[in-house]
Structure formats: structure tokens, C-alpha cells
Amino acid sequence: MFTPRRALILVAAALAAVATALPAQAADIPAPGEIVMSPNITHVTNVPKPQALADIHTDMAFQGDYAYVGNYYGFSIYDIKHPKKTSLVSSVVCPGGQMDVSVYGNLLFGSVDSSRSDDSCNSTGQTASNKASWEGVRIFDVSNKSQPVYIKSVETNCGSHTNTLVPDKAGENVYIYVSSYSPSASFPDCQPPHDLISIIKVPLANPTAATVIATPNLFPDGGFPGVPGPYPLGKSATTGCHDITAYPEKNIAAGACMGEGILLDISNPEQPKVTATVRDTVNFAFWHSATFNNQGTKVVFTDELGGGTRATCNAAIGPNKGANAYYDIVGGQLQFKSYFKLPRHQADSENCVAHNGSLIPVKGRDVMVQAWYQGGISVVDFTDSANPQELAWFERGPDNTAPPLDGGFWSAYYYNGYIYGSDFNLGLDVLKLNDPRTNQANSVKMDLLNAQTQGSYRERGNGVPGGGH
């Protein structure tokens, strides 16, 4: 199922704008570290991971001329005003995985889902059975990009695996929906059942007053009980949510909650209400993330089969597991339409599964760019949600700078004409997509992109309040 990759790279530039990735031969796996791509993608630059951050890169957020990239050891800020000359501005060393990041105004919010000795940047890891342990959300003032300042921490139940910003209509507060999961009877601050999210209210005029105001139970029936079984047959039980994507403009949100996907009414952001639930007991093992289309009439859910540490992009696993699932919203309910998975097999040393992505703002069409760990980055048109089509792709051969099954792209997002990829070990990559089917997206200018806070896009320079992890 692989495309002859070296030949693709040598295709004449005149064909690059219209070419589409072709079916490929499974045996044609690139050499370790070798860059391969469809002819309508250009690799613009790579900025290596900062030496100060000793762990892997994670998720990203964007604001103005800056990109913010999380790392299990802290986060970095990059100047992307001129994408070809993307450069590191500063790095903040503040250990505590996984450092899922969101930005709003002068504030950066970082998720900590690893038990720490305290909330400081000098903390050390310790077992969550210790009553003195801390996990939750850290808040930084990033008004000075060269010297961010840590201003507040908020502890939350079971920590914060991911976070989702929901600004209020008055512009006075921002709410943070905190997703976390997998409680344990031995963890004092993370007791089962854990069928809730934590909601932090942040007064923008006084962010140090941020506090948890609610912990709504999204699964009063206990949620999906799971299906026991070894990889790749088992299905996760619902013990919290992994990720929530909000679309505040439309008063809706979608949750990927381990054993199921949900829709929420967030017209009152302090009291989100589940309005629809869907389960897939055949193919989905772990509901990981969600992305709406621009109209808010579809949801792309992803299945992180194997937790991002398995080689799922091979013939043995097949095309429907560890994939995207496309759902139309019909009468307020989720209606399954199809699956999509990379049409190129990866090496057995390459962790590969559906992961974080965002919309490319193409008027009248639904197009998404997405990371697949060592499967690389893929661009898919799902306008016909029953028949998604890949438009472009980029990847490297196996990452030999790290142990097997421990590399690749965590996130891939489109922002102001370029695609940015956060690679575990190799840093920040910048790509340019040149295709007549998507080039009109270059006219859409965003002021802000948080992957879990979508905002509608319009043409010709109208800023977008959010974006489509």
C-alpha cells in the first residue's frame, strides 16, 4: 500500500499543485530519518528541540506571530512571523507531563497529569498514592515572550491530561474544561468512579483568582463498561474523558471519553450537558480526540489504539482500527459514516495511530490535517463523510534517535498558510501545502488557534477566535 516515495519527491514542480498521493507498496518503507512526501507538500524548515527540554515535545497552540509547544519538561515559544525562519524565543523548564497547552490573551495554560511533589517548577515526580502529591493546571503570564512568568496553579481531580478553553460571551472569564481519567483506589485525589470533568473559572482581570467551580458528572450511568481483552481486541471503559473540543460560537462541544464519544450543550459553560452518546464496540479501543467541521454538522473522532506506543499502521491491524471515524450530526444525534486510516503501511518499529489535527479553512469543503506519530502527517478531505480522501502526506522513516515505538508527530495543525508539526524528538517542523483544492485557505488569517477551542473561519482576513488536539 506504499507509494514509490523517492519517485514522488522527484516529480516535476509543475505537477505538485495537482498531484494526489497514490496507493503504495507496503515494502517501500523509507530509510531511518529519510523524509518522504507527496509532491504537493514542501518541507520548509525544522527547528530542533531545545536542549533545555530533556523530554518529548507534545501539543501546540498559536497566537499572533508565535507558536507555543508543550514538552513533558515544560514548554517553548517560537517566533513564526516568517515561517521559513521560524526560531526559538524561549523555553520554560517546568517538568510535569504532558503539558498540553492552550493560550488566551497573555495567559498560557499547561496541563499536568503526572504526580508531582508540589506545584512548583522545581517539583519532582512521586507516586500519586502520596497524599501530598499535586497535579492539575499551571498558568503562566506570557506577555513577555522572552521571560514567561508562572503565576498560578489549580489542582484538579486526577490531574489534567488535556485542557479546553471556553471563553464566556462577555469576555470577562475563560473556563477551562479539564479532562482526566483512569482513577485508582490507591490515589487519594483520584478515586473511582471518575465520571466527571473539572471546570476552572479564570477571571481575566485577575487570573490568580482562578479556581475549580464545578465537577459535573457526565456519565451518571457509569459510562461504557469496556470489553476485556489483549491488544488489539480490548475496548477501554469510560472512566473520564481524554479530550473535549468546544465550539463556543455554536454552544456545542464533543468529548472523546475513552469508551465513547459524546456531544455536549455548553450554552451555559458552567453546566455542560450531554445531549448524545455513541459507542463503537467493534473497532474503537480508546476514544482519543474530536474535531468538528466548520459548520458544526460533523465530528471526526480518533481512536488511539495502543496508546500511541504500538505499530498499528500495518496489515495485521487493518484499516478500521486505530483510525478516524466520521460522524454526521443528524437530529442532534451522531450518525456513523466511515473510517479513514493511512493508506501506507509503516515499519513495525514505528508507533503509528490516529492523533491530533485541525481543520484547513477551505470554503465549502471539510479538510483536516492530522498527525499520526511515526506515520507522519496527512491531509484528508472529508466533505463526503462517507468517503474521505487523502490529499497530501509527509513522513520520515523510522526515528533512530530514540527507542523503537517512541517517536513521530504528536500534533499537526494548520495556521496562517502553513502546517506545523510537533515531533517527539526532532522538534518543530514547518510544511507548506500547495494544492488548488486547498490554496484558498491562504486567505484566511487567524489571530488564535487552540486545537480544542474551535471557531468558525471566514475569508479575507477575518480573525478566528479558536481552531480545530
Image (cartoon, rainbow, N blue to C red):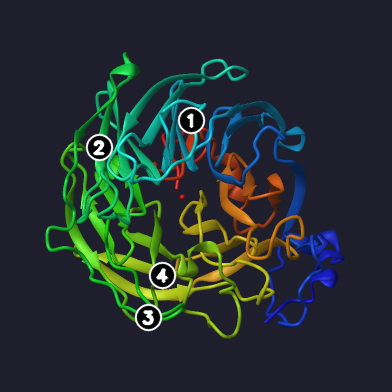
Is residue 333 something one can see in this rendering? no
**Disc 2, SS:** strand
Q: Which mark is residue 229?
A: 3
Q: Is residue 58 above or below residue 151?
A: below
Q: Residues within 10 Å of mark 3 (few under 14, many from 20)?
A: few
* Amino acid type, residue under disc 3 in the picture: Gly
Q: Position of residue 371 (x, y in %)?
A: 57, 57
Disc number lying in front (2 or 3):
3
Q: Position of residue 114 (x, y in %)?
A: 43, 44
* Three-letter amino acid code at the position of disc 2: Ile
Q: Residues within 10 Å of mark 2 (few under 14, many from 20)?
A: many
At label 1, which amino acid type do we have? Ser
Give yes or no for contact between labels 4 and 3 (Cβ–Cβ under 8 Å): no
Do we see residue 293 in this rendering? yes
Label 3, label 1: how far apart the Cα atoms are: 37 Å
Q: On the image, numbered disc 1 is attached to which residue? A: 123
Q: Are marks 2 and 3 in contact (CB under 8 Å)?
A: no
- Residue that label 2 marks: 199
Horizontal side, residue 410 vs residue 288: left or right: right
| Element at label 1 | loop
Label 4 – label 2 distance at C-alpha: 28 Å
Query: Within the image, what quadrant is residue 156 found in?
Result: top left
Decide which of 9, 113 is in the foreground and name it: 113
Q: Quadrant of residue 246?
A: top left
